[in-house]
Image (cartoon, coloured by chain):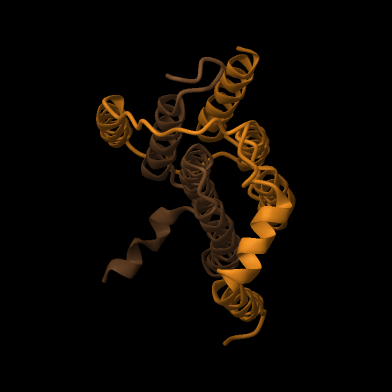
Chain colours: A orange, B brown
Amino acid sequence: MFTQYIFHFLSVMALFSAVMVLASKKPIHSVLFLTMTFFAIAGHYVLLNAQFLAVVHVIVYAGAIMVLFLFTVMLLNLNKDERSPKPLWVNIMAFIAGGMLMLTLIGIFRGYDIQSLQDPMSTQIGLVKNLGKILYHDYLIPFELSSVLFLTAMVGAVLLGKKEQI
Amino acid sequence: MDIPTNIPIQYYLVFCSVLFSIGVIGVLIKRNALVILMSIELMINSINLLLAAFSAYNNDPAGQIFVFFIMVVAAAEVAIGLAIVVLIYRTTHSIDINVLNKLKW
């Protein structure tokens, strides 16, 4: 019962801050609310007993990605309102489209029922030891390829960020 | 559900659907390229959480490995995306995506 209260609290916190990401006028407020969403989702990972993912999520999202966004906001001096808001009918259509997508997804998932469910609290798969064994044994090639991906992304970011003409 | 103290998997399905839809609405209504990138992050996060939830409920570690790789790709995507945003700002002095409609023709 106690975990359900935590689940509801984290869900409300994540959804509220996700809505506030869109409702904020200034980009820096959006970034801070996004960080709040990330922390709520990290709490969800802890609730699922996926401790490795919780730690990686906090490091990658709340650490790296939030800092990237904040640096961009501060470097570009964007702390002002959007210059040209979209016409109202575009916003209304966007809300209708998004709301219908949400209703469709919920309608699909409402009748969903899988029988052979495990209690996530009793499983040990989310611990660092077990995931590390699988990551370095079964998924070694994708793991190494992801380092190549990071190298490519780093070279690309440096190349794009250079001052002179490419 | 058969486990009384447990959270039903449907809760995760509904929560992640709502979070994903908020991200979709954000991509549709916002003009600021930064906020659009943030909405994409919201969508990626909802998918990650659902994948981790199914992985935990089915006792299958492959899902959590996939979440890890999705995080890797998302970090690379944000780095490149923000570099492109900086480049756009340098050439047009705005990150309003409306100025990018020149790309259409």
A76 or A140: nearer the eye? A140
The residue at the point 28 percent across, 67 percent down is B104
Residue A35: give x, y in percent of width and height.
Answer: 67, 39
Query: Which quarter of the rendered picture does the N terminus of chain B lie within?
Result: top left
Q: Note whether A67 is above or below A102 in the view shown.
A: below
Residue A75: give x, y in percent of width and height.
Answer: 72, 58
A136 or A103: nearer the eye? A136
Lateral position of residue A84 relative to residue B86, left or right: left
Query: Which quarter of the rendered picture does the C terminus of chain B lie within?
Result: bottom left
A114 or A155: nearer the eye? A114
Residue A146: give x, y in percent of width and height.
Answer: 59, 73
Q: Note whether B80 is above or below A42 in the view shown.
A: below
Q: Is residue B100 visible?
A: yes
The residue at the point 25 percent across, 32 percent down is A108
- Total number of numbered labels? 0
The residue at the point 56 percent across, 77 percent down is A141
Lateral position of residue A107 relative to residue A126, left or right: left
Q: Note whether B90 is above or below B30 in the view shown.
A: below
Q: Is residue A76 visible?
A: no
Residue B79: give x, y in percent of width and height.
Answer: 61, 65
Lateral position of residue A125 relative to residue B32, left or right: right
Quarter of the image for residue A1 reads: top right
Lateral position of residue B62 relative to residue A35, left or right: left
Q: Note whether B11 is above or below B33 in the view shown.
A: above
Residue positioned most to the bottom? A166
